[in-house]
Image: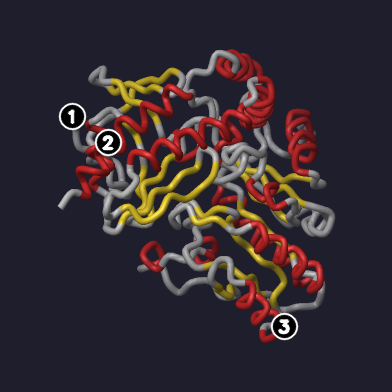
Amino acid sequence: MSVAAEPHVMPTYGRLPIALSHGRGCRVWDTQGREYLDALAGIAVNTLGHGHPKLVPALQEQVAKLIHTSNYYHAPLQERLAAKLCEISGLANVFFGNSGLEVNEGAIKIARKYGHDRGIERPEIIVYEKAFHGRSIATLSATGNTKVQAGFGPLVEGFVRVPLNDIDAVEEAARTRPNVVAVFLEVIQGEGGINASRAEYLQKLRRLCDQKQWLLMLDEVQCGLGRTGKWFAHQWADIRPDVMPLAKGLGSGVPIGAIVCGPKAAQVLGAGNHGTTFGGNPLAMRAGIETLRIMEEDGLLANAATVGARLRGGLERELAGVKGVLEFRGQGLMIGIELDRPCGELLKQACEAGLLISVTADRVVRLLPPLILSAAEADEIVTILAPLIRKFLAP
C-alpha cells in the first residue's frame, strides 16, 4: 500500500499511500487493483458517483462540441443552468465561478459593495466560530480556524465573529456595530465538524436581517445540492437567503461554482465589478445541467434522506454505549461522528479496510458519500467503520 514520492509537487497535502485509478458508482480502484467503497465522494463533490452512465456521454458530447470560449459572448448553457438554479431555490439570478473559495470571495465582495452603495465606507460582515469559507486571504479571514490562518497574516479586516446558534451574540453585534451589512454562515459547517445551524436560529437570523436591511448569505458549498435530502440545507428551515454560494457537488466532479442571489442582492454587481476567465465555461455548465437533471430523474434527494437516515441509524446502533463516542451529527448523507480524542489515524485504517472517509476538526469522522449510495452500501459502510471506531477507542 504505497506509491512513489512526489518530488515535483508542492507538499501541501498529507496524502494517504494510494493512487486511485478509476471508479464506477460508489466504488473506486487504486493503481494496484485494490477496491474501495467511497464514502467521501471527493469531499462532497462526486454527487453521481463515478462513471455515471447518464453523465459520461453528455460530457463526452460537450467536450467534442465546445469546452471553453469566454464571457465576452452570450452563453446559452449558462442561462439554462442559472434558470434551473433559480427555479429550485426561488432566487433571482446567478454568477458562475469555478470553486467554493471563488464564489465565497464573490459573496464577500457583494456584501461590501452592498454596504458601499448604502453609504457605509467600512462595511462589516458577521461570521462564525469554526467556520470554513476557503483559503484565499479574504475567505481565510472569514474562516474561524486559527490553525489554517497561521502564517498568513495580516488578515483582512471587516469581519465580526460570533458563536453558532447564539442569536443574542448577533443581536449584540446589531446594537454595537453600525457598519454590519451581512451575516455569512454555513448552514451546516463541514470542515468545522458537521455543526448544524438550528432551524429556529436561521429563522431568527432571517427576521433580523430583514429588520436591519442586512444580507443573509448562506454558504451551501458543502451542504447544498441535495446532500441533506432537500436541494439546499436552509430549506429545512423554510427560509430564503439573499446570497447563496454553491460549488462542490454541482458539477459531479467538473470544477464549478455559483453565487445565487435573491432580489436584495441581485443587482449589486454590474459590468466590470466582478469577473472570471474559466467561470461559466460550456463544459462546467453542461455538467451542472446534467447533474441536476439526473438528480431529479433518479430521485436522489429522497435517496439522500432515506439512505442517509439508514446509515446514521446503523452507526448509532453499532456504536451505542461505546465510551469515547460523543455525538452523531448531520443530516442526509452528511454525517459526523465526534470522538473524545484526535482520530486522524482512522483515515489510514479505513483505507486499509477498503473504505474512504474523512476526519475533520481533529476528532470528527466525516462521511459524505455520493448521493447514489444504496441501502446495501450504507450497511457496508457501517460494517467496516463501526468495528474500526470501536477498536480505536478501546482502552
* Secondary structure at numbered mark 3: loop
Q: Which residue sits at x=27%, y=36%?
A: 350
The amino acid type found where label 2 is placed reads: Ala
In the displayed structure image, the side of residue 342 where residue 269 appears, left or right: right
Residue located beneath label 1 in the image: 1
The amino acid type found where label 1 is placed reads: Met
**Lower position in the chain sequence, tag 3 or tag 2:** 3
Measuring from the top left, give residue 226's x and y in whole percent. Answer: 62, 37
The amino acid type found where label 3 is placed reads: Pro
Q: Nearer the viewer, mark 1 or mark 2?
A: 2
Please tell me which residue lies in front, 102 or 273. Answer: 102
Q: With respect to residue 239, does 372 lie above or below? A: above
Checking the image for residue 350, the label placed there is 2
Please tell me which residue lies in front, 260 or 64. Answer: 260
- Answer whether residue 275 is visible to the viewer in this image: yes
Measuring from the top left, give residue 197's x and y in whole percent. Answer: 59, 58
Separation of disc 3 and disc 2 at Cα? Answer: 49 Å
**Lower position in the chain sequence, tag 1 or tag 2:** 1
Corner quadrant of residue 40: top left
Q: With respect to residue 218, does 28 lie above or below? A: above
Local crowd at mark 2 within 10 Å, few (<14), some, or many (≥20)? many
Separation of disc 1 and disc 3 at Cα? Answer: 57 Å
Farthest residue, direction bottom: 176
Q: Which residue sits at x=68%, y=36%?
A: 70
Residue located beneath label 3 in the image: 178
**Count of labels in the image:** 3
Q: Which residue sits at x=37%, y=52%?
A: 364
